[in-house]
């Protein structure tokens, strides 16, 4: 057998009078030689054509394999001389955006990538509305069809753009949060949002693509990442996989800041995870001008060393139209180091000067005047926005402290790597996050921005046969910590609401 | 959980904030408590309705389970108060006749049974013609549909007769020889009859009933017994199961005489099997009047102790129309003990008197005169018929000697039980078979006639969850002995062609 991924060229021992194993078991044995999994599953449709193919190809074949949690699955058997590419599609099933990447399963290389708005937003932009809509079989079917059709359409376009055809897509791996995974698979999701927060399933496992309505290879298989629970989804498991957290010698941490802040800590011997509502304040809900990343959005704010002026950078260098989460963190850090906000996170009139205005009684900092913005309206940060950010950064730090120090008994300096995942994380400047006391004060070279770890994890599952077993092992062994917001937590939280912290000895690198 | 078979009433622990496992995994865990198999598989169609059912039934349910070789399968989840019977159907997929038995899976009891001619005989009465017909996809589909439709029709009638409905049939188990199993499943079978005799698959495993076209419960599962090879099929595995050969403390033997004589020897520690062409001479091919059992067929022949006359018994006490295999053995034994045939198996003119006639130069014994038969024609046994029987009985004894003495190194007296399986075996009189030297001279109370072991094995698989694992273990551990018809075999065969044997010390109980 040659190849290392899921596509292998095999040469079977031809049958003889002294070796009269049946065709199917002969193939099973050849596959078992390469995979330690106990069982090899050949779907009946394929078994029914096996004798003809094996004889036509003189007991050689290119096999496309995959896994489910019970077995190695033989997806299809191709002519060993078949030169057309064998493809897989990785899908990040995001609540707002979906990303599809097309892979050559033989080389492991990405052929193309495309992003699209999750069309389930037509039903409702938020997860709650969609879950309510999924309360009936027709609603579930509609939501599933919206997402699956969009994948079909965009995958077909991606194939056209790359001179390949969708019927050569044999494998799909999708990672999303628990709700998105359920809605993509057409499963009832009401339990996710009702106490005690019970998903329909935590292990959707490998499914027939045809069952979901994916118009790719007729025998194609789809793997949907498992969940740990209602609030710890397959996207996070994909992230752990992408960050190799489960294979680290020394403790590492991964933080994914989306709607929630999800944190995983551990190494090859243990993993623990927790999730907390820290995200909204950092995403579009944060302020009147807060928005997700797009052209014209301020994603970086720096301080001119000589003038102490604030310098804004926008995506694609377009005239500024708003500010995103990473821009907000930079801005808060810049305001703090320039003394424009104090250690309580309050705007300091003396330091702000004429940039400080009063809007309906609320002190407001004008970052960009209306004359300089792309909308004609000024881009501002009010004390209310700042307070939200302060709460959010304090929540993040407190959660990190609870899981790293109080739960795992480590200090922040024990963390070998600090991975920042998620769309928000792609833009974050660790130094700014440390300056405001949102992230712990460890050397900035220990921070690694991972980007779209849902997509990367899904790609890994398609190209590395060990990845499947790792996902299942991670799921089985990870300890989920329920964040207990008690008095102890609130005490820590109070200290973390200061800039960078009431205990400045924790942030030796932050100099004002 | 209550129940011991595949139908169990379970009470799940209701979810709570501290116990928020997903519905599907909660069910998996409950099932795993009872079954040691590593994985529990819940089909997606069932998963999609799980949350509603579990809540409606307050976390209680009647579950219908089954196995495939990878997992325990959850077939359906019923209202715990559902009082309608949960049914299974066992099918003996015979080349000529099929038998369907309807079982209550909760009690394990047989509700009804029906027999039917295998409608594939429309294509060809013999296996060869059917396999050739199965050379095209359309031919395979036609053969599959013939058999499956017949099962659908007769099962529906069996259900009507017993005031139940086919949609309550959740499980089906079918046992047939290798060719019949392939044709029932719509699989190509050409390899079975072409050297080196390679089946398409030896393990059809558990399939969706819908895939085969069975019109029973939409999620029903079908288990087809695995084969050892082209000439040792699932019917034999079902027989080993029915005879409990794999659980015996002491060595036992099972002989199934059909078209071939198939023999299995062993106990809980080892099993060996061989097959030889001994059967045809004992079945309908044996003589001009030979036939399978039906009303009017002579199935027993005895000797009047005072007159030494031969007394015939017919099925249903109808006027005699022919003689079947068991009748033939009785007749040969009766002829031998009354001196009408000699130790070479030749008719003795002096002893036969006017019952001996000459038909075209061939000595022929008239058992029933034309005036006493149901057809108006005499029922006769010619020297040619007798010679065939002699060869057949010698072949049987020789095969038994080869496997028991030469291969296993046992003597016949070591055999704790001697099981006789198959339709032919149902009627056989062991004493007569010993008298002619066909079966070894062991106490007749060690012989047990098992009847339709294919059907019994299939019933066991439906009612005893251990049976599935036993079948797979038997398949994995059984040693198949290729009968090597060499000079040594021919020497043994020559001795066995005498009545009862050249070595009469082997048959101390046979007194002439």
Image (cartoon, coloured by chain):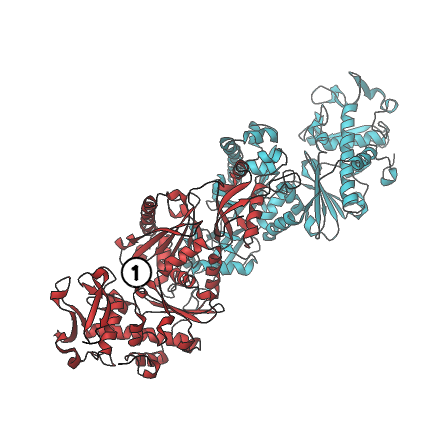
Chain colours: A red, B cyan
Name the quadrant containing residue A174. bottom left
Q: Residue at x 11, y 65 (%)?
A: A371
Residue situated furthest front in the rendering: A306
Dot 1, crowdedness within 10 Å: few (<14), some or many (≥20)? some
Q: Nearer the viewer, residue B331 or A102?
A: A102
Q: Is residue A49 above or below residue A6?
A: above
Q: Residue at x 23, y 71 (%)?
A: A302
Q: In terms of secondary structure, where does tag 1 sit?
A: helix
Report the label total.
Answer: 1
User: Label 1: chain?
Assistant: A
Name the quadrant containing residue B426. top right
Please indicate whether residue A292 sits to the left or right of residue A268 in the image: left
In this view of the protein, can residue B403 be seen by the observer? yes
Q: Is residue A122 above or below residue A346?
A: above
Identify residue for label 1: A128
Please indicate whether residue A269 sits to the left or right of residue B423 in the image: left
Residue situated furthest top in the rendering: B360
Q: Position of residue B93 (x, y in %)?
A: 59, 37
Q: Position of residue B475 (x, y in %)?
A: 63, 47
Name the quadrant containing residue A361. bottom left
Q: Position of residue B82 (x, y in %)?
A: 47, 52
Please indicate whether residue B319 sits to the left or right of residue B469 in the image: right
In this view of the protein, can residue B108 be seen by the observer? no
Q: Position of residue A293 (x, y in %)?
A: 25, 61
Q: Quadrant of the C terminus of chain A?
A: bottom left
């Amino acid at each position: 057998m040659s190849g290392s991924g899921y596509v292998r060229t095999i040469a079977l021992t031809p049958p003889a009078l002294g070796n009269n194993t049946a065709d199917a078991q002969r193939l099973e044995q050849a596959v078992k030689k390469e995979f330690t999994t106990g069982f090899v599953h050949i779907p009946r449709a394929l078994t029914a054509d096996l004798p003809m193919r094996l004889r036509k190809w003189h007991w050689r074949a290119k096999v496309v394999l995959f896994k489910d949690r019970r077995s190695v699955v033989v997806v299809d058997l191709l002519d060993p001389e078949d030169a057309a590419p064998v493809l897989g599609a990785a899908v990040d099933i995001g609540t707002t955006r979906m990303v599809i990447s097309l892979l050559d399963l033989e080389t492991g290389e990405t052929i193309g990538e495309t992003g699209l708005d999750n069309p389930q937003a037509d039903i409702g932009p938020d997860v709650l509305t969609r879950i309510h809509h999924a309360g009936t079989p027709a609603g579930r079917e509609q939501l599933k069809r919206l997402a699956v059709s969009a994948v079909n359409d965009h995958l077909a376009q991606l194939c056209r753009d790359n001179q390949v055809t969708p019927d050569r897509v044999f494998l799909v791996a999708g990672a999303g949060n628990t709700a998105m995974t359920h809605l993509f698979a057409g499963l009832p999701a009401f339990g996710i949002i009702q106490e005690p927060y019970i998903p329909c399933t935590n292990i959707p496992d490998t499914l027939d693509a045809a069952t979901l309505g994916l118009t790719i290879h007729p025998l194609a298989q789809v793997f949907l990442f498992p969940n740990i629970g209602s609030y710890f989804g397959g996207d996070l498991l994909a992230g752990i996989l992408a960050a190799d957290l489960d294979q680290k010698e020394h403790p590492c941490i991964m933080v994914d800041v989306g709607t929630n802040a999800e944190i995983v800590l551990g190494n090859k011997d243990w993993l623990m995870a927790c999730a907390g509502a820290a995200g909204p304040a950092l995403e579009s809900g944060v302020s009147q001008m807060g928005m997700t990343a797009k052209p014209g959005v301020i994603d970086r704010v720096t301080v001119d060393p000589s003038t102490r002026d604030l310098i804004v950078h926008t995506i694609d260098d377009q005239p500024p139209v708003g500010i995103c989460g990473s821009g907000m963190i930079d801005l808060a850090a810049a305001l703090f180091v320039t003394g424009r906000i104090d250690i309580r996170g309050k705007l300091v009139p003396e330091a702000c000067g004429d940039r400080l205005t009063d809007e309906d009684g609320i002190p407001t900092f004008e970052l960009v005047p209306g004359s300089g913005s792309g909308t004609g309206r000024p881009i501002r940060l009010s004390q209310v926005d700042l307070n939200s950010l302060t709460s959010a950064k304090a929540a993040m730090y407190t959660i990190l402290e609870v899981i790293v120090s109080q739960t795992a008994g480590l200090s922040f300096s024990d963390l070998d790597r600090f991975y920042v995942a998620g769309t928000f994380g792609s833009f974050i400047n660790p130094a700014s996050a440390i300056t405001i006391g949102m992230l712990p004060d460890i050397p900035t070279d220990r921070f690694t921005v991972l980007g779209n770890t849902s997509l990367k994890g899904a790609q890994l599952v398609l190209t590395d046969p060990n990845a499947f077993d790792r996902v299942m092992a991670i799921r089985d062994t990870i300890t989920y910590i329920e964040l207990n917001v008690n008095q102890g937590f609130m005490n820590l939280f109070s200290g973390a609401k200061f800039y960078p912290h009431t205990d400045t000895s924790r942030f030796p690198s932050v100099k004002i």
